[in-house]
Image (tube, rainbow, N blue to C red):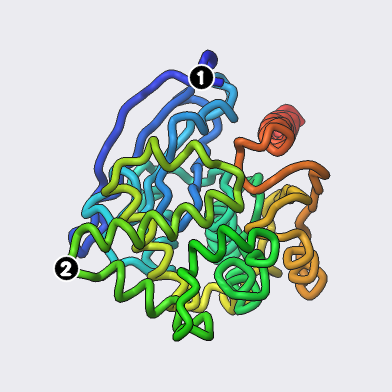
């Protein structure tokens, strides 16, 4: 996948206030169509392997590590980590680079951010390709972390995730147990809870080989940020998403793997059926959640190229 990796241009740490330094790496063609990549998690950070999605000549590719994630500083910060901050950061990056309009690409919670941003700033987004959209509703949170959703698909893995404590009978209590574990002064206990949290999601995503590649600090930061957002109901992201969906004017393609166990197709279809929108939904029958799903990767890559063709044809016309 990395044989055709777009050339590296530069990297910067951009200050956006409150001590936040956002890591931004640029690749590809500086004269190409500007494109912002939005990673998931929240808190996962960007991976260089994701550059395999892009043609080096077509796009000026911007890999942004969101607050507290990847190489952004401070790593794992929660104090100023919330939905409004993430959206404001996207606009701050655009302004700092002097970009008038750009494209968005992202998956999972990154897809959620893309839709919200494109609804709040419709005049700034030309087109976007999103996949595995996370629905930040009560149903979406319950499916991922509760006892009656994905837990039934992977009962043994969920037992390890929940710890099977007899005193915990609700999702709220489970999240509180993780909050206590991840905020413990005992470093061993903190890392134990962090690995349990991340291993549950990786099991659902079918990405068992990812965790050993992550440094312990990155595992802890990812678990901290994901729990932080889950405990705060994603900072009202669902109501914001519902409110701005009708304002999205960019050419928007959303891909959904029918085997996605983290963001199930049924939740997405129900959400879209209730919204006023002009999004094109493409289902990938054997696609899962992450880009390590070959069919999803190929479908996303094809749509990113189709997005360039659509823009190129408009420019010629």
Q: Quadrant of residue 278?
A: bottom right
Image side of residue 278 versus residue 210, left or right: right
Q: Position of residue 202 (x, y in %)?
A: 53, 49
Q: Residue at x 40, y 61 (%)?
A: 86
Q: Residues within 10 Å of mark 2 (few under 14, many from 20)?
A: few
Left or right, residue 67 beside residue 275: left
* Residue at figure coordinates x 21%, y 54% from the top left: 74
Estimate the x, y position of residue 227 in percent, counting from the top left: 41, 68
The residue where tag 1 is placed is 2
- Please tell me whether residue 265 is drawn above or below residue 240 in the rendered image: above
Q: Position of residue 286 (x, y in %)?
A: 79, 42
**In the image, 83: left or right of 69?**
right
Q: Nearer the viewer, residue 92 or 220?
A: 220
The numbered mark at residue 67 is none
Residue 118 seen in render: no
Q: Which residue is mark 2?
A: 185
Choose the circle earlier in sequence order: 1 or 2: 1
Q: Is residue 210 above or below residue 120?
A: above
Q: Residues within 10 Å of mark 1 (few under 14, many from 20)?
A: few
- On the question of residue 25 being in view, the answer is yes
Q: Helix, strand, or loop for circle 1?
A: helix
Residue at the (48%, 82%) spot, across then down: 166
How far, Cα to Cα, is label 1 from label 2?
40 Å
Q: For numbered disc 2, what is the local secondary structure?
A: loop
């Amino acid at each position: 996948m990395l044989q055709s990796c777009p050339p590296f241009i530069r990297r910067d740490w951009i200050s956006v206030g409150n001590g936040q330094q956002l890591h931004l790496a640029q690749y590809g063609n500086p004269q190409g169509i500007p494109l912002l990549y939005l990673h998931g998690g929240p808190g996962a950070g960007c991976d260089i392997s994701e550059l395999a999605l892009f043609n080096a000549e077509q796009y000026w590719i911007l890999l942004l590590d969101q607050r507290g994630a990847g190489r952004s500083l401070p790593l794992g910060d929660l104090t100023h980590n919330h939905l409004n901050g993430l959206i404001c950061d996207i606009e701050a990056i655009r302004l700092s680079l002097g970009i008038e309009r750009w494209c968005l690409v992202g998956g999972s919670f990154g897809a959620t951010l893309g839709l919200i941003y494109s609804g709040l700033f419709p005049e700034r987004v030309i087109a976007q390709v999103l996949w595995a959209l996370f629905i930040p509703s009560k149903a979406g949170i319950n499916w991922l972390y509760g006892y009656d959703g994905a837990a039934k698909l992977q009962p043994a893995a969920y037992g390890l995730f929940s710890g099977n404590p007899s005193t915990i009978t609700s999702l709220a209590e489970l999240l509180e147990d993780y909050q206590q574990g991840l905020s413990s002064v005992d470093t061993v206990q903190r890392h134990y809870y962090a690995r349990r949290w991340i291993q549950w999601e990786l099991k659902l995503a079918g990405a068992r080989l990812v965790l050993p590649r992550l440094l312990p600090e990155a595992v802890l930061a990812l678990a901290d940020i994901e729990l932080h957002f889950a405990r705060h109901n994603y900072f009202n992201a669902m109501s914001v998403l519902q409110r701005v969906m009708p304002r999205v004017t960019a050419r928007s393609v959303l891909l959904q793997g029918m085997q996605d166990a983290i963001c199930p197709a049924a939740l997405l279809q129900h959400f879209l059926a209730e919204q006023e929108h002009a999004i094109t939904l493409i289902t990938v029958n054997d696609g899962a959640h992450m880009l390590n799903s070959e069919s999803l990767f190929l479908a996303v890559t094809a749509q990113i190229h189709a997005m360039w063709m659509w823009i190129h044809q408009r420019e010629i016309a």
